[in-house]
Amino acid sequence: MSGAATVAAGQERSPEGIRRTVWGAFWSLLIDMYDIYLPVVALAPAIVYFEPKNLPASTTATLFYLVFAATLVGRPLGAFIFGHLGDRWGRKVTTMIAISGFGIATLLIALLPGYQQWGLAAMYVLTLLRFIDGIFLGGQYTAAIPLAMEYAPKAKRGLYGGAIQSAFPLAYVLISLFTSLVFVFSPPGTASAPYVQWGWRIPFLVGALGSAIVVWFYSRSVPESELWRQSPKTRSPLRELFSGESFRNLAQVFILQSGAWFLVNSVISTLPAVLITVLKLPSVTVTHELLIAYVVLAAGFVTAGAVSQIVGRRRLYAIMGLLSAVVAPVLYYLIVATPKVGFGAQTVLASVLLLITIGMWGMVVSYISERFRTSVRSAGYGIGYSLAVIIPSFYSFYMLGLAHFMPYAYTQIVLVVIGGILVLVGALMGPETKDIDFVAD
């Protein structure tokens, strides 16, 4: 990295700072991802609460995807806003503002009326709130992740990054367990079922409460980055990011992350809805299958982060991109083509599919942080992570277009192949980063 000066004194020798910032990043990402996947897990069995009756299955699935996509589209805007603040105001205060914002948005969603009370306005307001939610969600990792990585020792950035990113699948496990518990006393089913009428609100209320707790933890326990304090501040982090070396790094990260987001949307975001709304599998069964698969994926994230510290992040990204393009489509086909194969077989297939296509996310925390200098690390991480989500976010429309040429339930396979190729190309375009020192610019 050009412009390197001195390493922040004592930055890597503060065990307490490491512990608090890594835990802070983990808990903030956990509540972030819990919030992201609230529609996928908690709202999917109750989406009819916001929709007219007797819609075709493909239309219902598309409306469901739009609610989810609204959040993903809001995240890049949040990354621009909070990336600037993170590099100008500091990582800690920016994280607290972002978490407070999406906690309030989640609370408002929990209080929304449905189609019977507001008509289509209910769906419009839900989508708008999820968009606003996404803006604040785009600020959480923009600041919290660079803060943790700037404290982490170089030799353990991969491991700590994988551990932090394990909050991603663990959040899915948490919300799946909690939603299953809510199913017990408010069963899902038709539009008049207890879960559809009021049960879905409980996971949203828990998400809002969790946000408040994480903000409290940051205010009391998490220090600001000493490396950021010692680094000269640029007047316009965004202008610096979109010029020279930083822009070239951003372009490479954009290609790689576009592929990673195509894989997330093609597997995590769409698979539950396809199994439930198109293949008509019981929502409880799908929730339990994916719960087990996500526990496996959490371990896979930590493993990928640790292995990348040994073999290199560039090489591991390239390998997993190739596997995603070649092997993952076969696994996805087997899952969709054999819905009655049995709980155990479906769970194994889903677990392996997730490890191949999503396991690479265990390197995201360390890799993107390593691609940008300290003065623009917050903006670089947030925008590099989020800007790439825009094109893949319209996966529901790509699927509808592909459905003219192939069965709708298999259209994700094309997107999986595209995602794998982009990851492979993006990885090969970039350098190895595991040995880079973080310095005050």
Image: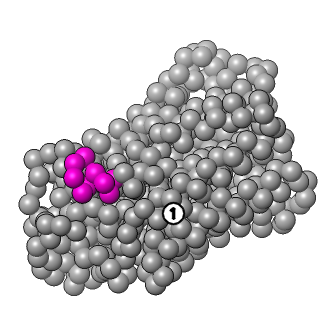
Q: Residue at x 15, y 51 (%)?
A: 88
- Residue identifier under label 1: 361
Q: Is residue 159 depicted above or below 403 in this figure?
A: below
Q: Is residue 167 visible?
A: no
Q: Residue at x 45, y 33 (%)?
A: 131
Q: Is residue 396 depicted above or below 310 in this figure?
A: above
Q: Amino acid at mark 1?
A: Trp
Q: Main secondary structure of the magenta part?
A: helix
Q: Position of residue 94 (x, y in %)?
A: 25, 50
335 vs 218, nearest the viewer: 335
Its colouring scheme is: one colour
Q: Position of residue 110 (x, y in %)?
A: 52, 35
The picture quadrant where one finds residue 360 is bottom right
Q: Residue at x 41, y 71 (%)?
A: 161
Count of numbered circles on the image = 1
Q: Is residue 395 depicted above or below 15 in this figure?
A: above
175 vs 351, nearest the viewer: 351
Task: Based on the picture, tell me whether residue 246 belongs to the magenta stretch.
Answer: yes
> Dot 1: what SS?
helix
Image position of 159 (left or right of 284) = left
Image quadrant containing the C terminus: bottom left
The picture quadrant where one finds residue 324 is bottom right
- Mark 1 closeness class: few <14, some 14–19, many ≥20 residues within 10 Å: many
Q: Position of residue 220 (x, y in %)?
A: 25, 63
Image position of 122 (left or right of 367) = right
Q: Position of residue 152 (x, y in %)?
A: 30, 76
The picture quadrant where one finds residue 158 is bottom left
383 vs 170, nearest the viewer: 383
Q: Residue at x 33, y 45 (%)?
A: 79
The residue stretch that appears in magenta = 242-250
